[in-house]
Amino acid sequence: MHKREQPGRRTVLGAAALGAGAAVFGGAGQASARDRGGEAARALPVPLIIGHRGASGYRPEHTFGSYQLALDMGADVIEQDLVPTKDGHLVCRHENDITATTDVSAHPEFADRKTTKTVDGVKLTGWFTEDFTLAELKTLRAKERIPGTRQHNTLYDGRWEVPSFEEVLQWAEREGRKRGRRVWLHIETKHPTYFRKLGLPLEERVAKALRAHGRHRTNSPNFLQSFEPSSLQRLGKLVGCPKIVLLGTPDTRPWDFVEAGDPRTVADLIKPEGLKWIAGFAQGIGPDLTVIIPRDKDGKLGTPTSVVKDAHAAGLVLHPYTVRNENTFLPTNLRRGSDPNAYGDSLAYFKALLGTGIDGLFSDNCDTALLAAAEFRTG
């Protein structure tokens, strides 16, 4: 889940266990934050692990191969990013630009669909979901987004289709029946202001799909997330699911703020008054990792900020993003060797982040994340 651009044993803790665990992470303030996570969320372990686009460290992101592996590894929640098709269906892609994540460029019948667009102020050239019907997208196959970093994932290029959100909801129901427990989802609306201007609003479509599957209530097994607070405010009028405001680095602004002329930055939103404002319509925040622990000028891991304490004081949970095992994504002091694509000491990074008292995190590598989280779950 970068705004521009994560086999373990799953332990489900009941409310009593969660209450006991609060002492490990800061007492009453943390327990209050868990309560704000939503009625159903109290049954999840703390800290919970979210499979970022599935198990995207091992399979091409947002494919059923990635989702299934994350679930089988034991991820507590599986993430979906949603964008619309030309005919109004929701599909799971990190971006509406599908140039890097599908084989669309190899389809001569779609050569004339290549175009240049400006999405949230960024000029992009490629192929976009809103220019294809669902049936047309289903003729494509997914591929690894960063093959230079994850060459092993290219083994699965062409193996899976682009999944629709409806198919994911059906999959979650099947897997839930098979496992005898509910399958949790972390559902993001991508570029909602952009799509609303195109006449393809996301929130109403998400709400309709959730209602059709009985996943629209406060006790439903899903979180709703967005980088645009207004999208979550809109969703809050349609469904009762817990909502997480995603936050970029402190110097950035939500795109709906840019469009509305709101001068506040993420730095403003992570101050106590900003967190109090978020708590008026959401149950948590999903900040960039550097909001929790900044890096110094050399890229080394720095000192934790007060954001965890401040968010918990406002009654909010924290689900920061995204820890990956490869050196290129780690703080410089946790890299090992000279190969940027080799694994570094990600376990140390997981432990440093979890030690701040966060309530969960996103990772491309669910198994590594779960290994680290187990130490904190048991106290």
Image (cartoon, rainbow, N blue to C red):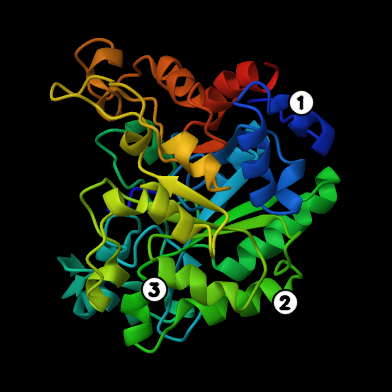
Seen from the viewer's position, the closer of residues 221 and 340 is 221
Marked residue nearer the N-terminal end (2 or 1) = 1
Q: According to the image, label 1 marks what residue?
A: 20
Q: Which mark is residue 261?
A: none
| Amino acid type, residue under disc 3 in the picture | Pro
**Dot 1, crowdedness within 10 Å: few (<14), some or many (≥20)?**
few
Helix, strand, or loop for circle 2?
A: helix
Rendering coords of residue 333 (x, y %): 25, 13
Seen from the viewer's position, the closer of residues 115 and 267 is 267
**Dot 3, crowdedness within 10 Å: few (<14), some or many (≥20)?**
many
At horizontal 45% and vertical 47% (from top left) the residue drawn is: 286
Closest to the camera, between mark 2 and mark 1, is 1
| Amino acid type, residue under disc 2 in the picture | Ala
Q: Which mark is residue 192?
A: 3
Q: Which mark is residue 212?
A: 2
Closest to the camera, between mark 1 and mark 3, is 1
The answer to whether one can see residue 138 in this image is: no
